[in-house]
Amino acid sequence: MHFHAFHILLLGMSLVREYNSSQCTCEEKANTCTFIPCGIPGSNGLPGRDGKEGPKGEKGELGLRGTQGLPGKAGPSGPKGEKGSVGERGPTGPSGGQVTQLRYHSELDHLKTQLRELQAQLKNLQATFILLFPNGMTVGEKIFKTEGSEGNFETSKAACSQAGGLLASPRNSAENSAIQQIAARHKKMPFLGINDIQTEGTFKHLNGEALGYSNWASNEPNNAEGIEDCVEVYSSGKWNDKSCGEKRLIICEY
Ligand code: MAN
Ligand code: CA
Ligand code: CA
C-alpha cells in the first residue's frame, strides 16, 4: 500500500513539472524557452458560481453631526435675582426757579391762545354789530332785520322773500322782544308773518305751522274792522289783528 502511494506521489510531481514548463509566457521564457512555441490564448470560460457570503465587516466610522433640533419649551422662571448696584447719577434737574419759569411759559402760551380766540370773537361781534345795528338783532340762530321801509302784508312778505328771508314770525318771547326793539328804534309797527286768511279765527305762520307762541293784546284778535286777518305789533310788544292792506314796517327774519 505504501509503495503504491509513493509511485502516485512521484507521478503527481512529474505532472506538475510538465505543467509549469508549458505554462510560461513568451516574454518570461524568451531566453530559456526559445523552441517552445506559444499558442493563441483561448477564450475566457463562463463565470464561476457565486462565492459564499463573506464575514461581517468592521464597524464604520462615526457619521457627520446632524442639524440643530427645535428649541425646547421654556423652563419655569428662576428665583428673583439680587438687587443691582446703584446706577450712575443722572443729570442735574431744573432748579426750583427754573420750574417756576417753565410753568410760567406754559401758562403764558395758554393765555396767548385764549387771547387769540377772544380777539377773533370780538372781531365777529364788531362785524355783527356794524351789520345789524340799528336795523337788526340776533336771537339764537335767527337774525331779524329791517331796511326801514314799509309795505302792506303782501308787499312786506314779497320784500323779505326777495331778500332771501321771511316776514318776521316770532316763535317765543325772546324773538318777539327782538322784533319789538327793532320796531321801537324806527318808531313804527310791523306786520308779522302770521295770519288767519285761510280760516277766520285760526292764525298760522306762513309755512302753515300752528301758533305755539302768541302775545295777543287783551280782547284780541277781534276781527274788528270787518276783516282783520293780519297781525301788527304794538310798541308794548303785544299783538293786534289788523287789516292786511295797512302799511307797516317790514322786518324780515333770516
Ligand atoms: C282798532 C283796531 C282793531 C283793534 C281795536 C282795539 O279798532 O286797531 O284792530 O282791535 O282798535 O281797540
Ligand atoms: Ca280775521
Ligand atoms: Ca283787532
Image: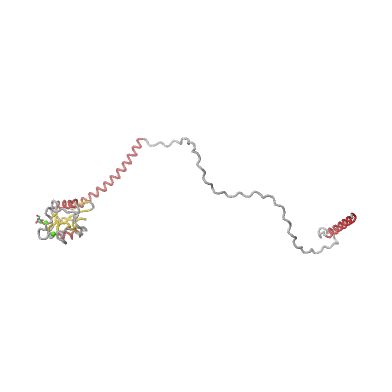
- Give the image location of residue 128, x and y in percent: 22, 51
Q: Quadrant of residue 104?
A: top left
Q: Along the line of sight, which residue is nearer the eye, 182 or 8?
A: 8
Q: Along the line of sight, which residue is nearer the eye, 204 or 119?
A: 204
Residue 162 appearing in the image: no
Residue extending farthest right: 3
Residue visible at 16% across and 61% down?
199
Quadrant of the rendered image holding ligand 1 = bottom left
Question: The N terminus is located in which quarter?
Answer: bottom right
Q: Along the line of sight, which residue is nearer the eye, 96 or 69?
A: 69
Give the colour scheme shown. secondary structure
- Give the image location of residue 33, x and y in percent: 85, 59
- Give the image location of residue 73, x and y in percent: 52, 46
Residue 199 appearing in the image: yes
Is 172 placed left or right of 30 in the picture? left
- Give the image location of residue 123, x and y in percent: 24, 49
Is 53 placed left or right of 136 in the picture? right
